[in-house]
Amino acid sequence: MKFLTTSLSFFLVFPTLWGQNPALKSKWGEIPAADLAMTIYEKDSSATSVALLDIGNMSIEYLTDKITAYLDVHRRIKIFDPSAFEKGNLTIPYYSYHGNEKVTYLDVQVIQPNGEVQKVKSDNVFSEKISKYYAQKKVFIPNLQKGSVIEYKYGIKSENIVYLRAWKFQEEIPVRYSEFTIVYPNTLLYHNIDNNLFGRIQSTATEETFGRGIKKKRVYFVEYAPALKEEPYITTLDDYRDRVDFYLSHYYDNYGAPQPVIAISWEELANNLTEKDEYKFGSAFSPKSRSNKDLWEAFLAENNIENDSVLGIAEKALRFVSKKIRWNGEYSQIPRVTPDEALEKRSGTTGDINLALLALLKRAKIDAYPVMTSSVDNGRVQTDHPVITGFNSLFVVVKHNDKMHLMDATNPYIKLGNLTRKHYNGLGWLVDEKKSDWLEFGTHELSDVWLVELQLDEEGNARGKFSIMADGNEAMNWRRELDESAPKDFLKSSFFKGFTDVTFDSIQVIGETDYDKPLKINFNANIKGAAEVVNDFMYFSPVFHRAYDENPFKSTKRNLPVDLVYPVRQDYIINIKLPPGYTADELPKGERTQIPNNGGRAGVNCSQPLPGQVQVIIKNKLNQTNFQPEFYPGLKQFFDAMTKNSDIQLAFKKA
Amino acid sequence: MKKMSILSILTTAALSLTTGLIFAQNNLYSSLTIPLSLRENATHVVRLRDTKIEVDDDYSMVVKEKVIITLLSNDAGSYSYLFSYDDKFRTTKKMEGRLYDAAGQLIRESGKSDIVAVSTDSDGELTQRKTKYLHLPNATFPFTVEFYLETKQEQFFLLPSFEIQHFGEAVEEARFHLITPANYGLRWKANNTALQLQSTLEKAEKHWTATVKNLPAPQKESYTPFFSRLYAEISLAPDRVKMEDNMGDMRDWSTTGAFYYNLNNNRDALSPAMQATVQQLTAAARTNREKIAALYTYLQQNYRYVSIQLGIGGIQTLPASFVEQKKYGDCKALTNYMKAMLKVVGIPAYQALIYGDDEEFPALSEDFSRPLFNHVVLYIPGEDMWLECTSQQAPLGYLGGFTAGHPSLLLTPEGGKLVQAPLPPADANQRHMRLLIDIDAEGNGKVGTQVHYSGLLHDMYRYCSVEKDAAKRDATFSKSLGVSVKDYQKLAFNADPNAPLASIVADYETRNYAKVSGKRLFIPVNKIKPFDLALPVDSLRQHPLQFTEANIIRDTVVFKVPAGYKVENAPAPTHISAEFVEYDLSIGPLVNQEIVAVRTVQHKPLLAQPEQYQDIRKVLLNIKKADGAQIVLVKDSSP
């Protein structure tokens, strides 16, 4: 505590930064009258609360032989409405494992609209252990009113000095002013990773002397950050959040020579990772390692690979690992456990599972590599800084005959060459001690094709011969369902839910375990009341399977870009034989809608190849998967067109 | 010794594989030994559940449970977890597990590091509870887990039930054994089973036992009247309990209520200043109802829900002085506080224990007092009024779908009274919608909407009316529609502060209301709010079917169609009537380019036997079909 006063005094004199509005910032307890009187936040009148102030001062201190990071935070929140009283439930989480982080002080007060200051006493403050690793302070602020200002400050002392706590300038409520200052001795070399998509973050860098040393100082601030709100079809909100991260790469020793703390280049990071040292990542897949011996033996006990091709062995390894080790829903870019331990536990993270796969491939002398990546939910891969925290997951690539084959054993029904959805983010870092490199890859499209030969009778009942086929991860999804339920139940629940009376016969599933091929199902279906018969007319809606039952984009407005992850292709072709005596009475016009630059097309076409027969062809293809908010109305229109095409109606007339 | 037995199991399992023989002697770890009759409809099979509960003289208990479960499919995934928790009164003594493959070979044994302890409190919550779990997953099914759990509970007011069977669960054998002091008073009630609890006296102990064997799995079905997915159980209730220094007589609802009443009595003192505030707030009120309204509004606008439950805080309220000072509290504390304010103005009120949940609630019977509650509301006998004290929006005297119609225990000075919280009758839950849909030659629609909701149907729209974020309101409303909205010209929600009524005005454009097909225009009648109650095929229904919805829907749609069309075919008037539903749809003629369609739907509660299932399903399918009707217009070629 004593130390804190000295550290705080360091920040007392604050130069005003260029462009900074000094009115937005004020000291502890000094709430401008206008803020007390405020009843609405002008920049966002829908806000029920606003963070007036969010200030963080990080100081890295060298004390004897220990480096410590001190963070002082000062926040102020204005409450406009009783529904925002919950902002008075504060939580301050920290990494408590082995005492790694500690909350050194916490002061909370409420300033009522009339200016009265009420200190929040310690009987409102609680400590909670969240898990083995995390704890938090909880504060339930008493006596809140409409118009109250909550003000609090706290300090966190941390031994994590390599990857510092990120500073987030934005939250789910608007933040009027957020500022982050970091000061560290110039004997430490820190780098910043900025996420500043909208150019709101401003910063300055200066140096100051203290005693015989020099301290580096950087100040960042954002004024009037809007509230950041969740929307469907995004990667992660953090991709769009104004924030800065700092990491330490070197310190300078007594002779002024730089000593690396972590890897300083991608090459070095790769070398570090692939070392066959027992505690490194490389040992997981080293063919000589003891950590994957049981796995290899278990694999050989179930698989004869003597006469198999490279891809044949890879296929067996993929199936073996994915069926033996279940994904536990967690991500890691480095192993949490060894491959043998993962096998023993029968579960693992993405990193555990795919490194087990890699271990088998390496043992089988296949040219294979780990590829580190950031999962779709984790957001964009950052490529500027060689830090391992830029990744959170891992898959495998096999090089064979100058071709790259992607592999991901976190789903037992996957095709060799495909990744699961979570890994389709377009970019990974192939780790190779000789030559690591960025690997760009596209997403394999979800596709299905329907061919239907249908005979209608006079009552409007239909008998159809269906031949349906799925490829890409759509086939993976179908295979999982077929493994867990009977084919007729799969067909009924997936495609014919809306029909009251359907029976199937001659169901034939082709290629259920030929994972490298599309999955085909042939079947006949008798569908009662498929068409509506009224007087001399028969009305028929010929589409049994739609790419989209309804437009998935419900909101009329959009703030963040849309990320659909998968390109989609769907072809639906139906030939309809009319009952004797009926003719098609003027077919609908063909329709065609496109997204510019080959982004997608959706079309429907009707024709009469022979008298008494009607053919309908629907082709939907979506190539582009990322859309800026400006294009949202266009995207929504495209999906409207796709659903409209599937809603097509035919009319037949008795001659 | 343990190692030896595992080894012998391994050897036998291996033997069985090589010889291909099925055991005569049951190997409970192997999925191969499950009798065929127990596989049908089962997602998992309880091979053995052995529960032993020892209740001590000091009202504490030790529960020891061993289970061996074979998981047959992914649907049973949750059974690969063993859950427990610790709090001030409960300690988990032992938590262990083993995982076996399909053939019954041991894959792994859990270690200390496999036990995860986490706090699951939300940001506005503080309990002393730590959730503990142990997870033994396997990548492929079937597989078997064996768990052992031992807990010690210092004091309790609920005894664990003998949960005989859940849906989708087959039971090879389950044994239940409760040991109590000889003079321990215990009541039990069998739900959906003929099984009896046997009791014997041995020296100073009483033994209560029951065993079941070879129960096939009850099929998982929708709309069944079973609470908490539990198919059969023997419910237990002790006659006397002790919580800290409070003894409770739980033999009937009256004494049970008295126990809670005494625990929560005399905790309603307000400061003189607060009493003055209460007087001031109600000074202008002429009737008791007006006084209640003034104080309820004051509570809603100035206090928030925060759940702090320490010690016996789970069943005893924090004193009113606490809430007065903090301006927050949990359901007990806010209810008690409202009661305290009413007391100042001479209006008596009772705390009412209740089970809050939007989906289901336990049936409590008059003759078996077992206080299965999780929430408290306030009952004012003078006005016959119920108050939900944790909501900042609820209108005066209105209980929403969370508690309406649920059994409730009133805590009166004379003891507990089991009653039913009011459930609005069908005609109090209504939707009246007027739509004007202007359709152009491409099938686009301009929609003008006016909707009035009442009772249980209005809850969601009250929420919208207080939501300040327009994007959220837009998204919530858009999601409730069967069409995709291109743009809103107007979207406004309004909720009556004094009654369960909400109204919406919405004007918007949609791109694909009607479909153009050559010279025809197909106009679906009920696309915006289609009838969506449907039942799955369920080839052979096993259990009763229950619908609880009771409401009335009246929609009028005026279609304005482009010039030059005539009606080729329009659906005939439909009337479908059954015990649980009345459905009417009528479509008028095309006059001045307008067609008027009127639909009324009345849902009534239903409890039906399994044999009625297919008929009920057919009725719903017929309604769905009628509801999906289209008006077919064709270009008028006559001069």
Image: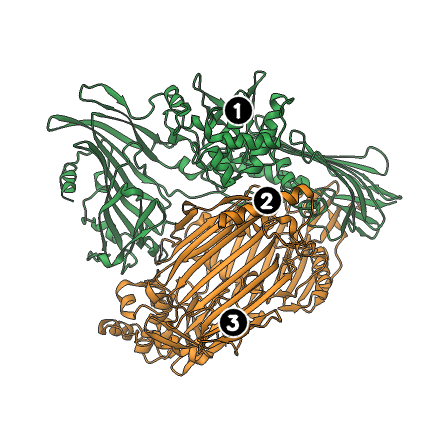
Chain colours: A green, B orange
Q: Label 3, secondary structure: give it.
A: strand
As shown in the figure, which amino acid type bears the numbered disc 3?
Trp
What subunit carries mark 2? Answer: B
Side (left or right) of B308 relative to B274: right
What is the secondary structure assignment of the residue under circle 1?
A: helix
Is residue A376 among what the camera can see?
no
* Local SS, label 2: helix
Mark 1 and mark 2: Cα distance apart in space: 31 Å
In front of the other: B352 or B550? B352
| Residue named by callout 1 | A363
Marks 1/3: CA–CA distance: 59 Å
User: In the rendering, which numbered label is found on residue B11?
Assistant: 2
Residue behind mark 3: B208
- For the point 38% across and 82% down, the residue is B413
Quadrant (top left, top right, bottom left, bottom right) of the C terminus of chain A: top right
Residue B48 lies, in percent from the top left, at: 57, 57
- x and y, in percent, of residue B170 in the image: 62, 58
First in residue order: circle 3 vs circle 2: 2
Q: Name the mark on residue B486.
A: none
Front residue of A260 and A450: A260
Q: Chain for mark 3?
A: B
